[in-house]
Amino acid sequence: MTTWAHIDGKELWSAQNPAPPNGRPVFWGPPTIHGDHVYATVLTFPLRYDLRTGRGTDWVYERLIECHPPSPLVVQGNGLWSVTVNRTEGGINVVDLSDKDRGPWVFRIVKNPERYWITAAANRVFLLDGTTLAALPVF
């Protein structure tokens, strides 16, 4: 993951790829900026980086092992939201950013995560599946 200056295109920082498990290639999910941090999924784990320096922070959440990497992470309220998928079902994961030790909440409402879009605004998280829109409250 790399950032460039808008004015002159110079590289500001580049985050180092984590070591790949079992020799599998490492890939990044779409980044999300919130405050002074950049959140991005690496493989299936959401990580947090300092926006100014690109250094990883001590915040690593490894319980969301089902994060769907092509789907963006969404920050709204005190939560980090993501589409999740495993072999049999999908859902929405939420991690409390103020207390990561609480564990994630998982809402099993997603049937086919490849078809879903997630975004947030006005203290709601929106989930779109084709023509169906769900507005989820945040905390």
Image (cartoon, rainbow, N blue to C red):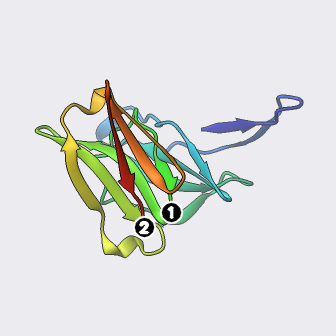
For label 2, the residue is 139
Q: Quadrant of residue 112?
A: top left
67, 34: nearer the viewer: 34
- Kind of element beneath mark 2: loop
Q: Is residue 34 left or right of residue 45?
A: right
Q: Quadrant of residue 96?
A: bottom left
- Kind of element beneath mark 1: loop
Which residue sits at x=33%, y=74%? 102
Where does residue 73 sit, x and y in percent of width and height? 46, 46
Q: Is residue 37 visible?
A: yes
Specify the farthest residue to the left: 88
Check whether the beta carbons of the residues at disc 1 and disc 2 lie within 8 A of each other.
yes
- For residue 50, the mark is none
Q: Is residue 106 left or right of residue 74?
A: left
Q: Quadrant of the N terminus?
A: top right
Which residue sits at x=24%, y=46%? 91
Which residue sits at x=82%, y=32%? 6
Height in image: 15 above or below 97?
Answer: above
For label 1, the residue is 77
Q: Is residue 65 visible?
A: no
Q: Quadrant of the C terminus?
A: bottom left
Circle 1: residue type: Gly
Which residue sits at x=13%, y=37%? 87
Query: Crowding at label 1, few (<14), some or many (≥20) Cα neighbours within 10 Å?
Result: some
Circle 2: residue type: Phe
Where does residue 127 sit, x and y in percent of width and height? 36, 40
Where does residue 37 sit, x and y in percent of width and height? 63, 56
